[in-house]
Image (cartoon, coloured by chain):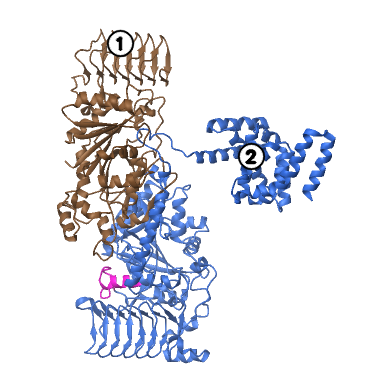
Chain colours: A brown, B blue
Amino acid sequence: MDFQVVVLAGGTSKNLVPLVSQEVPKALLPVANRPVLSYVLELLELSNLKDLIVVVEGQDAALRVGGWISGAYVDRLHVEVAAVPEDVGTADALRAIAHHLTANNILVVSGDLVCDVPPGAVAAAHRRHDAVVTAMLCSAPVSGPSESGPAGGKDKTKKPGRYNIIGLDPTKQFLLYIATGAEVEKDIRVQKSILRAVGQMEMRADLMDAHLYAFKRSVLQEVLDQKSTFQSLKQDVLPYLVRSQLRSEVLLNGTPQAEDNGNEKVASQNSQVVLSRLVANASTPSFHELYALGSNGSAPVRRTHKCCAYIASKTKYCVRLNSIQAFSDINRDVIGEASHLSGYSFSAHNNIIHPSAELGLKTTVGPHCMLGEGSQMGDKCSVKRSVIGRHCRIGSNVKVVNSVVMNHVTIGDGCSIQGSVICSNVQLQERVVLKDCQVGAGFVITAGCVYKGESLARK
Amino acid sequence: MGAQRKVGTRVSEDQEDLARVPLQAILLADSFATKFRPITLERPKVLLPLVNGPMIDYTLAWLESAGVEEVFVFCCAHSKQVIDYLENSQWTSQPNFSVSTIESHNSVSAGDALRLIYERNVIHGDFVLITGDTVSNMSLTEALQEHKERRKKDNNAVMTMVITQSKPSPITHQSRLGTDELFMAIDPYTKQLLYYEDKADHLKGTISLDKILLVDNPSISLQNDRQDCYIDICSPEVLSLFTDNFDYQHLRRHFVKGLLVDDIMGYKIFTHEINSSYAARIDNFRSYDTISKDIIQRWTYPLVPDVKCFGNCTTKLDRQGMYRALEIGQSRSAQIGPFTVIGNGTNIGNDTKISNSVIGEGCTIGSNVSIEGSYVWNNVTVEDGCKLRHAIVCDGVIMKSGAILNPGVVLSFNVVIGQHFVVPAYSKVSLLQQPIKQDSDEELEYADQSSGVADIPSITSTSDQLNGELISKLSERRSWAASEVGTGGVGYIWSVCEGGHEEEWRHSVAPIPADKLAEVMQTTDDELELSAQDGNVLPPSGELKHDFDSEDDDNEDSRDESVYFEKEVEATFLRAVNESVKEDHIILEVNSLRLSSNMTSTDCAGALFYSVMKLALETAHSSTSELLMNAASLITTWQKLLKYYLPSVDEEIEVILKFEEMCSEFAKEFSPLFAQILHLLYDKDILQEEAILAWAAEKEGADESDKVFVKQSEQFIHVSIYVHFLFHNIFSDSMQSCMWSFASSMLTS
């Protein structure tokens, strides 16, 4: 396998306070009672990508993530966990582990991705075009992730145009322009040279960069070495490669490299290019090749490289856990409409109740709910569209709606929890009412308190 | 084929409304451009022969076949010639096709023309708007149908533009018709036109689309491989829009762009793409060449020499695209190559070679002549041994033996080229002297043939007369310099004006030479390099943000924020001035602004001071002293407000720095007054001596350029402040005021 996978698992993201803490880095946040990182790892495993480097911000977090991985995947995956200092950019994170990278192509995945698009398909597209970079794009949610369910109090509302603005060629295979909606001040500036070469460019605002990239290693390392100011893959490296695709400054050792890749489909000779195209099932030469050939069609006069896009089909699920809102949404989706991702088998009532969980009298657990191992619920409780973790003790007359309750949470009688996230070891005393709140780990809420749209955490 | 289409439109129309409006068209028989000069000085462009038929015939033939029933021909330049031609042509006697003319003498643009037509009140429904130099065989049915359906849903869809596929050359950035490359943004689903840029700025490596476009449409198709056919289906509103916006002149540059930019009225333009049919407009010599070849190669069928039923129907098509009129005299040894049209009554001598060319009627071509890729109009005499390569030769030209036309030459009517004279490439020769160059390009664009050549008719009317007569007449007036067009030659070589010789090759009939291509390619590469470099500077890599897990942070630039804050404070202040709000209230408002934008009180002080000074600057003043008065009165009025935000020396220094920045950047008018205003501020107790001294000290180590204002105020700083400082501490108040007046007198002296 000439692909090496780098999973950027992050650290303790500020966006997710108070859900994350020293004990629970972002990668270990539970989604349907499994760490979010497990979704990526299992997705990679499905594509038979088993040689992974997981990069974690912060030494402590790395230890915890490493500990969990070695426990869960010891005989399934070959995982190396690397720690980088906190708050480094994605590019810096890759620089830090550069010496580990040996394969010809590198697949970089964000550790907070919950999706069912096979990375193997992205890798295949990457190899087919011998691209320097292939980015996976998925359709952005129509009106932002907050379309259903109450928004988390601290979460920023998604403005229109926050997504990426992406330019594609008519065949939708090549990436011609990329910018984050938020970054574009007023005007979208499209390079005429690229537009001239391709003739027609489709600008899309309804696609989202899924943070899954395949890079050619030599190019990636060259860019990282030469452009020391680049900090982020998404905001610096990828736009740079896209921008300079018709005037490539990378791959100075050019075609021999391509041959080294063992990719016979691309060759230096014209005739072979034609042949390769037949093999690649592309009837016309790509605009890169035409452009490189110049006007007289003889030897290539310009150096180009290809930036490809893999567009996931609309039916696929693909969301990143990068905000509290996303956390709630993903939890709801994974036990709801995207239930195939969870890996659990659902009961006849379309919910998952662990056999060891105990339910009191007249307690109902609705569809799209999950009740973890060893949790107990009192009488006359009602749970709707919520995830409840392991070993929780829930009193009587408790209502849990659209919420996530992590492990070892104690909830007193008569509590009502709506649209909230309650972290591990939280204690809610009697008659607490929470609406759209986040409660940090170990917090204690005294009896009868009413909170709305607040973030509660231990100081 | 035309009849079928007509039936189609009629049926659809019957369905929608009973009062059937005949399909109308406006044909502008004036290009309002100067690209065909010098030829168009003597004959209107629409009457120039295109493969031996006037251009307007092609346009009218298409309109008739496309089901148009009423055509209004708008004539401006040489209107008499156009009207005369139409009156004597077959078009006025067609059964279901009426052609009427509208004459104007003072229209200088398409905008003027449409305004005039609006006044005439002749257009009653949707109409086709084209110019008289359009060649097409497309069916209008589909485009009309689309247009009407859109209109039913959305009354603001006022225009449908016809576009076709044509990839511009990647090297010269122009289409095969010689027009500039076109950048369009089109909604792929509704086909709405969102962006249109034809006069592209070559130096700019990027095109800028408004971000709003993508908010409204999830997907936009940016196109560079399309070509505008200049065939528009318009609703009657278009005419009134031109009347409302009296500054609209150019159809594309003003009208289309105006509608696209101005979203207040919400008018929309849509596109209709044709794939299999032909539509093109003769814009320049290159498109004349391209379209002529297309006609010869039958892309425009049925508008081809042997089918079209206007003019001479006697042309026969031979093998290899050779069209020959019935009565031609051709020597046995003459070789007539492929894709050539020979007109009626033309004689061709021995061993003459003609290829890829159009020869008009009644021409006399001698022996051993070689004609390649050229357009020879009617009654031209080419004597023995001449060579013509990629040239246009108008009616009545005489080329004496051995004359050579290099590629790109245009010989206007009745020019005589002397023996063995070599006409340099891309030169234009006319009997008329080149009009004196107008001052502005813009004027030249609109000032058409009608201006400056009012005395032409005498010459144009003689165009049918014998050349000899004319020559003798002209030679009486002036003896021709042999150097111009050779011995015995008649005509002026026009010096190249607009664009310079460099650009001549772009629009000429001649193919672009290889060395030019190489040159241009080199420059495009350089440009690309430049743009790539630009690209490196421009993009958001400046905001080096890691998106590892915090990409959702707002990444607003702090600088933008401060600018925004400044603007807000200024607006608050201006409102206070205009509505005489109490100072306390301003303070409250500014404070709340400060808190909401997370600024310090230093920023407030700077911003407020900036607002005051800007107001002073904007108040009408004629001299610097008046400006000083303005500033002084404003500072006095608002001294309490200013002082409120200056609790400590730090803020005061900030104010001085701000003022310095203002003086050196945009409010240069203040710079001579710097010291005086500083003095004033000091007098009013707005600034303390410590602040001024600290500022001066701070600037000590700065660059020379930064110290301009320190130097200017040096005297003031040294004299007044030290004196003041000393006396403040040592002497009594009375002495102080005494010494102060002394110091002031020193300062002013």
- Across and down, in percent, residue B194 comes to 39, 51
Is residue B21 among the parts visible in the rendering? Answer: no
Give above or below for A359 relative to A11: above
Q: Nearer the viewer, residue B487 or B347?
A: B487
Image check: A337 left or right of B31? left
Indicate the secondary structure of the residue bearing disc 1: strand
Which residue, given by chain and number where applicable, does mark 2 sit on?
B655
In which image quadrant can residue A323 be found? Answer: top left
Q: Nearer the viewer, residue A266 or B389?
A: A266
Within 10 angstroms of label 2, few (less than 14), some, or many (20 or more) residues? many
Q: Nearer the viewer, mark 1 or mark 2?
A: 2
Which residue, given by chain and number where applicable, does mark 1 sit on?
A394
Is mark 1 in CB contact (under 8 Å) with mark 2? no
The kind of residue tagged 2 is Val
Give above or below for B213 relative to A55: below
- What is the span of residues highlighted in magenta in the rendered image? B288-308
- Identify which residue is drawn at 82% across, 42% down: B741
The kind of residue tagged 1 is Ile
